[in-house]
Amino acid sequence: MENTYYKNKAVLITGGAQGIGLGIAQAFAREGAKVVITDADEEAGKEAVDRLQQQKLNIEFIKCDVSAEHEVATLMESVGEKYKMLHVLINNAGIADPFMGDLEQMLLSEFDKILGVNLRGPVLCTRYALPLLRKADQAAILNITSTRAFMSEPNTFAYSASKGGLEALTHSLAVSLAEDKIRVNAIAPGWIETGDWQKSSQRYQPQHSKEDKEQHPAGRVGTPEDIAEAALFLCSDKAGFITGQSITIDGGMTVKMIYV
């Protein structure tokens, strides 16, 4: 039987022009959703729309810097004018480079920039999307965090802090928006290979060593499709009793005991 849950439902995905966001956008569009992707990279956004429209999928792109309040407000006005309501908001946009160098040499402007996109962005998007989400039946918000919210490599201060904050924001929003019947959950990806999901000027053929694969209990590196399938479930009525939760999708890496 054909799954029609998302048919004609409005879905907004921030940072949807490349990587995990693009994989999620493709998955929702294939389920019949009316997908809007937003991204600060206009080149990537236009390429993403061309890529998915060639598959005859319903998708459009709106340029937006999610850390800028006026741009987010304008974005939600545009979505509201066209779709009247929003069924799913996926806060995926983020500055992905986690390494900042030595703490004493770190530029506070760079720290603020990362938190501005990775944490302030989801707050702004959720705030301005609320009137649209309230109009939908069984609305859902999904935050894309990271396993770096729970563990760290050296000198990843801003990225780890932003993703840890987004984890906390997830359960706070779930409780705060419960009366609006809006569920809020998170996915914390581990190593997800996005080489095939970049704009053409940055696309590359992934090369993974045997060690890269075998360090994962699952025996491989993750893909955007792995995240997208979980997103489809968490935002659907099948997950109607799940809210305020974070699901780690990392091939088992964070459950390994490692001794030196």
Image (cartoon, rainbow, N blue to C red):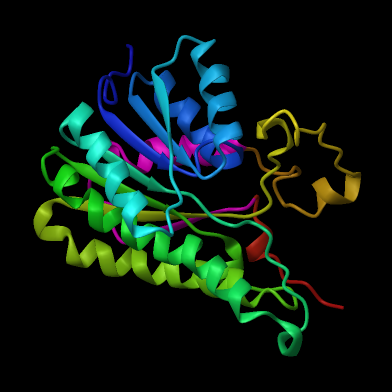
Q: Position of residue 186 (x, y in %)?
A: 41, 55
Which segment is the magenta one? 224-250
Dividing the picture into quarters, in which one does residue 75 lie?
top left
- Of the pair 81 and 96, the residue shown nearer to us: 81
Q: Position of residue 137 (x, y in %)?
A: 13, 38
Q: Position of residue 35 (x, y in %)?
A: 37, 28
Residue, x 21% and y 43% (percent of image)?
139
Dividing the picture into quarters, in which one does residue 6 lie?
top left
Work out which quarter of the rendered image holds the C terminus and state it.
bottom right
Left or right, residue 32 beside residue 179: right
Left or right, residue 162 beside residue 12: right
Residue, x 86% and y 38% (percent of image)?
207
Left or right, residue 233 beside residue 216: left
Does residue 239 appear in this view? Answer: no
Does residue 92 appear in this view? Answer: yes
Residue, x 72% and y 28% (percent of image)?
200
- Residue 241 forms part of the magenta stretch: yes
- Of the pair 173 and 246, the residue shown nearer to us: 173
The single residue placed furthest to the bottom in the displayed view is 104
Residue, x 63% and y 56% (percent of image)?
96
* Number of marks drawn: 0
- Of the pair 159 and 31, the residue shown nearer to us: 159
Q: Position of residue 195 (x, y in %)?
A: 74, 37
Dividing the picture into quarters, in which one does residue 31 lie?
top left
The vertical placement of 158 against 90, above or below, is below
Work out which quarter of the rendered image holds the N terminus and state it.
top left
